[in-house]
Amino acid sequence: MQKLILIAAAVMASPAFAASGPFLSLRNTNFIVLLAFILFVGILLYAKVPAKIAGLLDARAVQIKAELEEARALREEAKSILASYERKQKEMLEQSERIVVAAKEAAQAAAVQAKEDLKVSIARRLAAAEERIASAEAGAIREVRERAVDVAIAAAADVLSRQMTADAAAHSIDAAIAQVDAKLH
């Protein structure tokens, strides 16, 4: 259907049907169209339409040029802002790396300090335990000695009480009193 319409439009617009008679006749449509076109162009030139169109185009060109300059300026500003943010991001990354390194060093130092503190604490506890052991040992030795002295005194008293007579006891008491009297005076 479209092909049929296309063919019909081409046949109706053919110059053979439009132009009839001599060319410079008012009955020739081609000549009338030429005159109308020349008159139209003359009116356009008289009304200074080409100059106005040129002025509008020039104004549009100036506006486009200004927009392009503004776009360039914005692009440069965006580049500088982007570079600034990239620089700040790089600085922040470096700072975070420094913070991480410092934290690791602090953690290692704290671990070393904790080990040293633990060693000191263990040494102190060992020393305290050794002191307690020595004190307990000394106490046990002292207790054994005191017990041995008590047993020896009891044994000596038992032996002396079996061997001593009343006269010997009185003589021994008198000698002890004399010895104490000599030491005191």
Image (spheres, grey):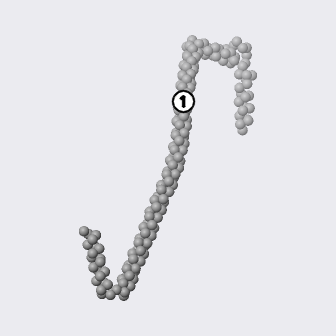
Q: In this orientation, which residue lies closer to the viewer: 117 or 164? A: 164
Q: Is residue 157 left or right of residue 24?
A: left
How dense is the environment of label 1, judged by Cα within 10 Å: few (below 14), some, or many (20 and up)?
A: few
Describe the element under mark 1 as helix, strand or loop: helix
Residue 164 sits in quarter: bottom left
Residue nearer the viewer, 117 or 159? 159
Q: Where is residue 121 in the image (x, y as percent from the top left)?
A: 46, 58
Q: In which quarter of the image is residue 56?
A: top right
Q: Residue at x 73, y 35 (%)?
A: 3
In the rendered image, the quadrant that contains the N terminus is top right
Relative height, residue 22 to residue 95 (above, below):
above
Q: Which residue is drawn at 48% across and 56% down?
A: 120
Residue beneath disc 1: 80
* Residue at point 36%, 87% (across, down): 162
- Of residue 6 and residue 133, the one placed in the foreground of this image is 133
Say if residue 181 shows up in the picture.
Answer: yes
Give the amino acid at mark 1: Ser
Extreme left residue here?
185
Q: In which quarter of the image is the C terminus?
A: bottom left
In this picture, is 79 found above or below 66? below
Using residue 105 as the reference point, say whether residue 33 is left or right of it. Answer: right
How many numbered discs, if any?
A: 1
Q: Position of residue 33 (x, y in %)?
A: 66, 18
Residue 175: x and y, percent? 29, 78
Horizontal and vertical percent position of residue 176: 29, 77
Above/below status of 64 relative to 145 = above
